[in-house]
Amino acid sequence: MNIHEYQARALLKAQGIPMLDGDVASTPTEAEAIARRLGGAVVIKAQVHAGGRGKAGGVRLARGPGEALDHAAEILGMQIKGLTVQKVLVVPAAEIASESYLGLIMDRETQRPVFMVSAAGGVDIEEVAQQTPEKIVRLAVDPTYGLFPHQALRLAFGLYRDFAQVKAAARIMEQLYAAFVANGASLAEINPLVTTPDGRVLALDAKIVIDDNELFWRPDLGLLRDETAEQPSEAAARRANLSFIKLDGDVGCVVNGAGLAMATMDLVKYYGGEPANFLDIGGSSSPEKVINALKIITADPHVKAILFNIFGGITRTDDVANGIVAATRQFKVKVPIVIRLTGTNEAEAIRVLNEVGMTALSDMDDAVARVVQLAKEAA
């Protein structure tokens, strides 16, 4: 679950990480009032779940309350990567002597939280990793013991030479690790971590991604979710208890089981198509889930054809068939549907489909090749 920068700042400040004061605004007038209260120059930052805010014009310097009002008026309502900016963060502008990167991510390979620090901060860490990977120092943390002080110091020496700044940065790393663990994060980063001309070390930015599995134990964290900042289809899928990720293709995929979903998308690519989504209706699928799945996929104007690829083990294929029939009766599906059903209650599923003039294939390759061809013909 992504959260906004102002929310991430609150979680980091709760652990004692030094940050400049700031506040969030939903209107230009609120932004002006915050800027007046903070005094001096401020930075207006779009709060949206998308990278590249600065390049899109979503981060601007205001030299006073009047400029803050003008910049906030321009940023609020702005579209950044398809998402509308509903709020802006107003923070004091800082004098910066140096910028560094500090991040903590859950690494699948080591199955541990891994620190990544770099003296090349203030830019996308992906660029640094690609162009100058030697500038990134990594450290895997044993979750049994946590981050030891000497490990934090070793990382901090990779950033600074002044020992006071080294100690300050090491302390921030310990606090970042505490925030990471306390909030069940899969990623936490500060970019940039800066030094000021008077020698202070401050976090100027904050990003946290919370592992969805943590929300079962911490429903309070779920209150941080902002559905207005998400793709509407993904928000609708979550409410319907469907695993869904929107992609850029034109072949809609409805599958049961993550492994089969991945294999289906691979096969769509193999036959020259592009999947429009990952959608897993799960192992035990009621007709209602199938109806919701079709509503979500047909809401995407880029989808030219839809594939149901169902292998019935725990899933009853007749439940899926009944869901398809019910959905097509509830609303008009304007794109062709290719159905592949095999497994539990397969004969009953085929009977249900045949009664309304639909057919089902049993071979996965045949079904995928057919849906890709239909999508190409409709393009």
Image (tube, helix red, strand yellow):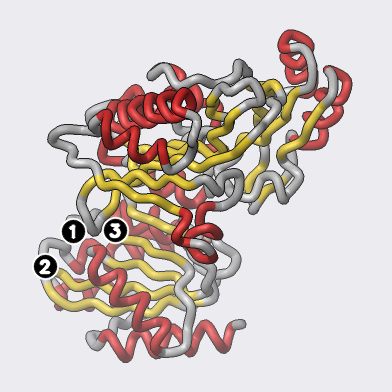
Q: Position of residue 315 (x, y in %)?
A: 16, 62
Q: Amino acid at mark 1?
A: Gly
Label 3 sits on residue: 281
The residue drawn where x is 38% and y is 24% is 171
Q: CA distance from mark 1 to mark 3?
A: 7 Å
Q: Secondary structure at mark 2?
A: loop
Residue 258 circle label: none
Q: Is residue 108 above or below residue 202?
A: below
Q: CA distance from mark 2 to mark 3?
A: 13 Å
The residue drawn where x is 28% and y is 79% is 340
Quarter location, residue 216? top left
The residue drawn where x is 46% and y is 44% is 235
Q: Position of residue 194 (x, y in %)?
A: 57, 32
Q: CA distance from mark 2 to mark 1?
A: 8 Å
Q: Position of residue 349 (x, y in %)?
A: 21, 72
Asked whether the residues under the numbered discs 2 and 1 touch, taking CB atoms below 8 Å apart as contact, a structural biologist would say yes
In the image shown, does 29 or 181 lie closer to the viewer?
181
Residue 283 circle label: 1
Residue 313 circle label: 2
Q: Amino acid at mark 3?
A: Ile
